[in-house]
Image (cartoon, rainbow, N blue to C red):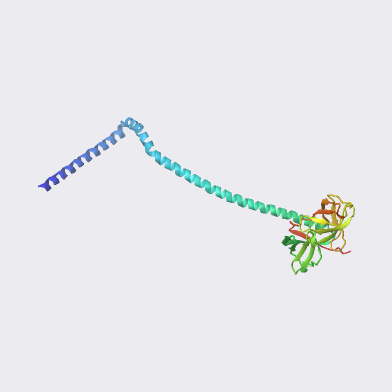
Amino acid sequence: MLGYFFGDRDSTSRKQLGFKFFISFFLCISLMIVDYKYDHLDRFRQKMSVVIYPIQMIVDYPLRKISNINYWLTSHSNLIEENNILKSENLLNRAALQRLDSIESENNRLRSLLQTGERLEERVLVAETLKVDLDPYRQRFLINHGLNDEVYLGQAVIDSQGIVGQIIRVNAYTSEVLLISDLDHAIPVVLDRNGLRTIAIGTGDSSNLLLPYLTNSSDIKVGDLVVTSGLGGVFPSGYPVGHVTEINIAPERSFSRIIIAPAAQLDRDTEVILIWPSIN
């Protein structure tokens, strides 16, 4: 009997749901027909839209914020990526520009050397420095020419500005140059202004040479040009050796301490010129 009671109750509930669904369906169809034919619901719809609009805005607000955040994050990420690309391109461009500057400087040096060679009456050959040793006790470097190019011991080496040194060792394809700034080097020189002869010796410092054998009464001034005298048969006469930069005279000494700055770029040369004696 209890089962019958619940079964009857379920049947009644299903009938009520079916009736409600039918009524709802009928009302929906009726409203659609009325709205389609007579537009009576437009005013109601407009009023409802005013009521619903704030609700829609509230519901849409988080979505809009999320969308804006996503857009900002995407834009920010794109900007960072673009900035990194531009930084890389700028770095490459600057490196290329440095290389172009270096090539231009090298071309200027070579042009200066070639012009120097063209002005010389002697046979000349441009050489590149391979290894530089500017230790105070070893002012010398290696060049890329040797016996195969008829390089010989004692041969004079210059650059576009003046005397660099002389060859002290010759191999088949390379040679070693002793700089005029080496402690073991001495070169006969003459003051271009008055013809006063003396000897310039190295100090172990590529920026200084010493004239140790001039007396306190010698006619010498700061700025005087010192050139090769041609004595000794190693260096041709008339090549710049340096300019007088300092004159120290002490009454207790017989000789002045005179410093000259080398004319050649001893610590910066990448190309030099080998000179052969002129054949008369």
Judge whether 207 appears above or below 48 on screen.
Answer: below
Tell me how many marks there are.
0
Rendered location of residue 149, percent (x, y): 78, 67
187, 254: nearer the viewer? 254
| Residue at image point 50% right, 47% down | 77
Name of the residue lying farthest toward the left: 1
65, 181: nearer the viewer? 181
266, 146: nearer the viewer? 266
Rendered location of residue 250, percent (x, y): 85, 52
Q: Is residue 99 left or right of residue 167?
A: left
Q: Quadrant of the C terminus?
A: bottom right
| Residue at image point 88% right, 57% down | 197
**Figure quadrant of residue 111:** bottom right
Name of the residue lying farthest toward the front: 252
| Residue at image point 51% right, 47% down | 78
Q: Is residue 255 left or right of residue 205?
A: right
Rendered location of residue 53, percent (x, y): 37, 34
**Figure quadrant of residue 184:** bottom right
61, 266: nearer the viewer? 266
Rendered location of residue 158, percent (x, y): 80, 59
